[in-house]
Image (cartoon, rainbow, N blue to C red):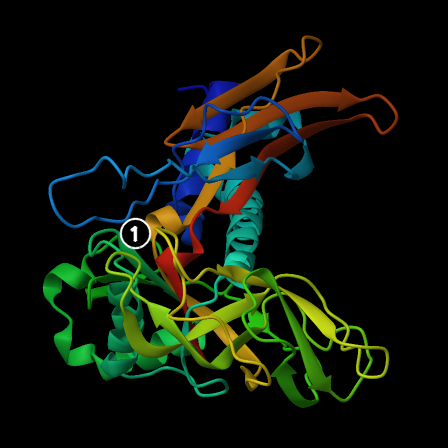
């Protein structure tokens, strides 16, 4: 029986299936905004859940609260493609042969790019547990991450954990006796187990965070500070990058509160630096951009109290940023790219929040046929309070 020429739709469908099968973190985050975007650079304002305080008694006339709606902007700013040359004869291969030879290697690279961009969102995450420089390897490490999410009132369902290969295999060894036949049958790429309320995944794209210079004995400069910046002093180096985006620190005497009850958990609140900061050691106080904001009252209260003057700041060391998170912590949007009118061999396939496009054309300069696969996407931290770094 003679071979049938492969169609663009058949190739695109196979490419999308391979893309989804080769993604790890991209399959574990929120992808429900897929219909909101139409082109590169587009953005949308995504609402966050409204929070309220409760009041005592039956009379509400003097305690009706203003609604404070918060939002975040999602931007499509990433695009990747893979292209290759081929002969017309190779389009007569069956789809399994063509996929193995061309599509799978191409899509593995695109899936890697997607996952890398999502793993880089660790810089937004201020909650952390574990010991920098020590690979997590025990069930108690999972429990410590789960405890942080519990204290943040994160729903117990749809929790994920993404570990770098070293942590993943050390962790797997520690609970190897817990494996069952059902676990070993899991077909999902990277899934190690379902333990401690987490789907535990392995991903080689987990990032390493190198902290800023952070020399000296940093202190809070001025009492009763609130908001998304913190004035500090006590650094001993004016080098840009005394703190860098993603650096986590605590402030003595400032404690985390449960986001529902607003009661102190007795654990120091962790903050993350959101932009590179010079120290100002010789030129004056250094102002650090921070997340979450220091908020001491109301439904969005984040801390037990504002910091005292000269409160000691402690910066977390460099570490591997494994992550535990609810799927609503991070978002991914892939855009259905335009199909050019002039291209005869073209297709675009969109499914389950992922989209990929294929085009084929003839290069008159080199006398070869070229196929390209394109994806365009954006990633965003939707709610950092739903995530936690498991440092290693």
- Compared with 153, 133 (above or below) is below
Q: Residue 151, image x and y in percent?
A: 27, 67
Q: Would residue 102 be visible to someone looking at this image?
A: no
Given residues 116 and 279, the one toward you in this image is: 279
Residue at 82% across, 80% down: 238
**From what the image shows, is residue 19 above or below residue 113?**
above
In the depicted view, which residue is nearer to us: 230 or 153?
Answer: 230
Q: Nearer the viewer, residue 298 or 150?
A: 298
With 10 as the anchor, is 288 left or right in this view?
right
| Residue depicted at x 49% and y 65% | 204
Q: Quadrant of the N terminus?
A: top left
7 sits to left or right of 283: left
Dividing the picture into quadrants, the one containing residue 33 is: top left
- Using residue 315 as the reference point, say whether residue 178 is left or right of it: left
User: In the figure, residue 144 lies in which quadrant?
Assistant: bottom left
**Crowdedness near tag 1: few (<14), some (14–19) or many (≥20) residues, C-alpha within 10 Å:** some
Residue underneath mark 1: 188
Residue 148 at x, y percent in the picture: 31, 70
Check disc 1 and report its element: helix, strand or loop: loop
At 57% from the left and 52% from the top, the residue drawn is: 117
For the point 68% across and 74% down, the residue is: 243
């Amino acid at each position: 029986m003679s071979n049938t020429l492969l169609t663009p739709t058949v190739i695109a469908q196979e490419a999308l299936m391979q893309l989804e099968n080769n993604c790890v973190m991209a399959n574990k985050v929120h992808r429900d905004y897929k219909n909101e975007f139409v082109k590169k650079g587009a953005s949308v304002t995504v609402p966050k859940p409204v929070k309220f305080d409760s009041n005592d008694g039956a009379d509400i006339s003097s305690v009706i609260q203003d609604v404070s709606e918060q939002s975040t902007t999602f931007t499509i700013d990433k695009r990747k493609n893979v292209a290759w040359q081929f002969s017309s004869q190779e389009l007569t291969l069956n789809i399994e042969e063509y996929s193995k030879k061309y599509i799978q290697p191409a899509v593995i690279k695109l899936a890697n790019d997607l996952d890398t961009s999502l793993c880089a969102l660790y810089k937004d995450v201020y909650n952390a547990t574990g010991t920098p420089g020590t690979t997590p390897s025990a069930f108690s490490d999972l429990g410590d991450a789960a405890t942080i999410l519990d204290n943040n009132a994160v729903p117990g369902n749809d929790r994920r954990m993404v570990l770098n290969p070293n942590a993943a295999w050390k962790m797997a060894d520690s609970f190897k006796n817990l494996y069952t036949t059902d676990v070993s049958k899991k077909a999902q790429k990277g899934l190690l187990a379902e333990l401690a309320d987490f789907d535990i995944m392995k991903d080689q794209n987990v990032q390493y965070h190198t902290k800023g210079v952070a020399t000296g004995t940093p202190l809070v400069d001025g009492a009763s500070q609130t908001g998304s910046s913190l004035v500090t002093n006590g650094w001993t180096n004016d080098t840009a990058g005394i703190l860098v985006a993603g650096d986590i620190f605590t402030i003595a005497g400032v404690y985390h509160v449960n986001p529902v009850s607003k009661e102190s958990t007795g654990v120091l609140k962790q903050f993350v630096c959101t932009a590179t900061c010079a120290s100002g050691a010789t030129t004056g106080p250094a102002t650090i951009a921070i997340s979450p904001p220091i908020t001491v009252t109301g439904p969005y209260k984040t801390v037990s109290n504002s910091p005292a003057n000269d409160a000691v700041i402690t910066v977390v060391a460099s570490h591997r940023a494994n992550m535990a998170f609810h799927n609503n912590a991070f978002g991914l949007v892939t855009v259905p790219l335009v199909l050019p009118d002039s291209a005869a061999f073209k297709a675009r396939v969109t499914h389950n929040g992922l989209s990929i496009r294929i085009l084929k054309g003839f290069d008159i300069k080199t006398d070869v046929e070229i196929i390209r696969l394109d994806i365009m996407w954006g990633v965003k931290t939707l709610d950092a309070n739903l995530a936690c770094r498991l440092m290693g």
